[in-house]
Each structure stands twice: as structure tokens, then as C-alpha cells.
Amino acid sequence: MLDVDTLYREMAEALRRAEERASAAERALADLRARFDKLVEVLVASGALAEGHPALFAEVGELAAGEVKPRVKLRMFVDKYAMKGVDIDCAARLHLCRARCCSFSFELSEQDIEEGRIAWEVTQPFKIRHEADDYCTHLDRRTGSCTVHAWRPAPCRGFDCRNDPRIWIDFDSGVPAPMPPSAVAFPAAGS
């Protein structure tokens, strides 16, 4: 019987292989599109197709493209352990900002996926996983701490909320932006 970590890693590897196949298919499709466009151009010039045919083909292509589902995305690689963190005392401001940054969505990196410690959305590989309250799976709802702090992704390590209007009206004065009704409440540090 497979354990959860092994299953998670195998799923991540299968999705990575699918991403490689999708990239190869995109290159082949671009080649095919270029050949098709040139063929239409030649056929119009020779009189085999009317002048309006290219516009008709473009319309048909747009309709078909609208039916294509999004594919797997990974964040550009940056060694998260080599990053310099942002100097903000999050614990002291948590009761004000209510960990709003932990509700943001972003793609994980290959490094995150390979480590197998960061949960991602099954329906949107490889975006960081959120719970029904729209907060990150890894946020401890009682304390406001990150349960995977040592392995947290690069966007979490490098995020500077000071000038982000989604979080603060005035960072220095401790005036948070309006909170959504679902925002988790945390006690002030030392309370």
C-alpha cells in the first residue's frame, strides 16, 4: 500500500510529464498553424479560395480555442532557501491584517513539488491549496502560524505586504484594508 507522500510525489511526477507532453504539443501546433496559414495564403493567391476564407478560418479557430481548458503551470524556478526574507514582524500585525496574504493564490515551483511538503489544488495543478474559507491549507487557524514555515514557497518568503492595498490602507499606522466576511480573526501578539 502506498503512503500519502509517495502517492503525492507520483501524482506530481505524472503531472510534470503531462506538462512536458503539452509543451511538445504546443510546439507542434505552432508549426502546423504556420503551415496552414501559408497554405491558405497560397490558395487565396492562386484563386482556389476566396478573399473571405481566411477570416472565416480565423473565426472558426477562435471558437475552437475558446473550448480549450487551461493547462498545468509552474512558477519560474528560484531557490527559495537562498532568498532573503522580508523584514516584517507578521506575528505583531496578524490581529490587524488577519493573514490576508495567506488567501492569495499562486503557482508553486518545481522545487516545492519535488519536496512534496506543500499541498496544491488537485483541480488546478500546481496552485497552492486553499480550504473552504479561502485561506491556505497550511495556515494554522488558531495561531495564525504557517505549518510548513521552513518549507514555505518563494512567494510567501518574498512577499512584502507594506504597500499592498489588498492588505493595508496604511501599514505604518496599522490601518488594514477592509476585510472580507470570511477573514479569520487572530488575537493580538502576547494576548
Image (cartoon, rainbow, N blue to C red):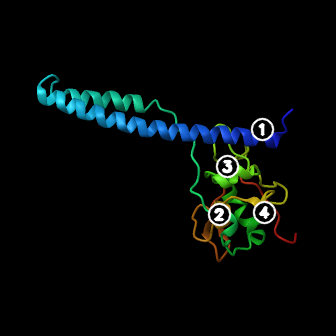
Q: What is the quadrant of the C terminus in the image?
A: bottom right
User: Total marks drawn?
Assistant: 4
Name the residue at 23% across, 30% down. 39
Kind of residue indicated by mark 3: Ile
Find residue 163 and report its image quarter: bottom right
Tell whether label 3 touches label 1 (CB within 8 Å). Answer: no
Q: Secondary structure at mark 2?
A: loop
Which residue position is annotated with label 1? 7
Q: Which mark is residue 28?
A: none
Q: Residue furthest top?
A: 48
* Earlier-in-chain disc, 1 versus 3: 1
Q: Which mark is residue 150?
A: 4
**Looking at the image, residue 150 lies above or below residue 12:** below
Which residue position is annotated with label 3? 128
Kind of residue indicated by mark 2: Asp
Cα distance between the residues tagged 4 and 3: 16 Å
Q: Position of residue 13 (x, y in %)?
A: 67, 41
Cα distance between the residues tagged 1 and 4: 22 Å
Mark 3 or mark 2, whichever is nearer to me: 2
Image position of 28 (left or right of 5):
left
Name the residue at 18% across, 31% down. 42
Which residue position is annotated with label 2? 79
Name the residue at 77% across, 72% down. 92
Mark 4 or mark 2, whichever is nearer to me: 2
Q: Position of residue 74 (x, y in %)?
A: 59, 49
Q: Secondary structure at mark 3?
A: loop
For the question of whether residue 26 can be seen, the reply is yes
Q: Secondary structure at mark 1?
A: helix
Cα distance between the residues tagged 2 and 1: 25 Å
Image position of 181 (left or right of 188):
left
